[in-house]
Amino acid sequence: MSPSQPDHDAEKPFDSPGTPADQGPREEQLIRQFVEHWGVMARSWGINATMGELFALLYITGADWTAEELRERLQVSRGNVSMNLRELMTWGIVHKVHRSGERREYYRAELDVWNLFRRIFQERKRRELDPTLLVLDQSVAISGDDPAHRAMRERVEALQQFFALINSMSQRILALEPDDLDDLRKLLEALGPPQ
């Protein structure tokens, strides 16, 4: 076992007393807090809590885990782990890792923050913003030019314009390269805090 890979067999689930042999109390507390928070955040975003916790555990440890190790650590069913790992891979924020000479499959989180943000942002845009824009476009088309629908059409058009602006900003943000982000950060810092 390499030094960068924790001994998962020694790890205990969050609800077990004590801490893993290779982790001190502070590290275990950090991992627990991070994972639990991502589970809560996932629910508030309308995502399965286990999906958030799986990603968080993979990310915060920076290590490769088998599905069984993840199941044991989070104390969830095999099916739950399997389903959520597939979804995380669909999002592109968890990758399957093969080690030569081993039959077991390992999973690793995307650790590059910009790639991570970009993939999550793209997936949220695809699932939420794009369908909303489509419905708004269809709603404007359905309302037509009938004067009886003028007020309704104006309300829908106001939303359509707002979401089109958000979509345009999203596309520009997603097109940024990592070096551009530093320039953007400097620009925002120069503008000062929002009033």
Image: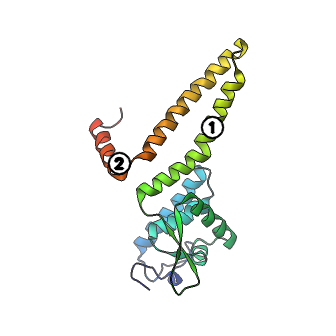
**Type of residue at label 1?**
Thr
Q: CA distance from mark 2 to mark 1?
A: 28 Å
| Residue underneath mark 2 | 181
* Helix, strand or loop under label 1: helix
Q: Are marks 2 and 1 in contact (CB under 8 Å)?
A: no
Give me the residue at 52% from left, 61% from top.
Answer: 93
Task: Point out residue 144 in the picture as x, y percentages from the top left corner.
Answer: 70, 20
Judging depth in this view, the residue of 140 and 52 nearest the camera is 140
Give me the residue at 40% from left, 78% from top.
Answer: 4
Above or below 153: residue 31:
below
Give me the residue at 51% from left, 58% from top.
Answer: 37
Sequence order check, earlier mark of 2 and 1: 1
- State the mark number for residue 132: 1
Task: Point out residue 38 in the picture as x, y percentages from the top left corner.
Answer: 53, 58
**Type of residue at label 2?**
Leu
Colour scheme: rainbow
Above or below 77: residue 3:
below
Task: Point out residue 118 in the picture as x, y percentages from the top left corner.
Answer: 47, 52
What is the quadrant of residue 158 in the picture? top right
Q: Could you tell me how many numbered marks the image carries?
A: 2
Above or below 135: residue 120:
below
Give me the residue at 60% from left, 41% from top.
Answer: 130
Query: If the image is split into quadrants, where does the C terminus sit?
Result: top left
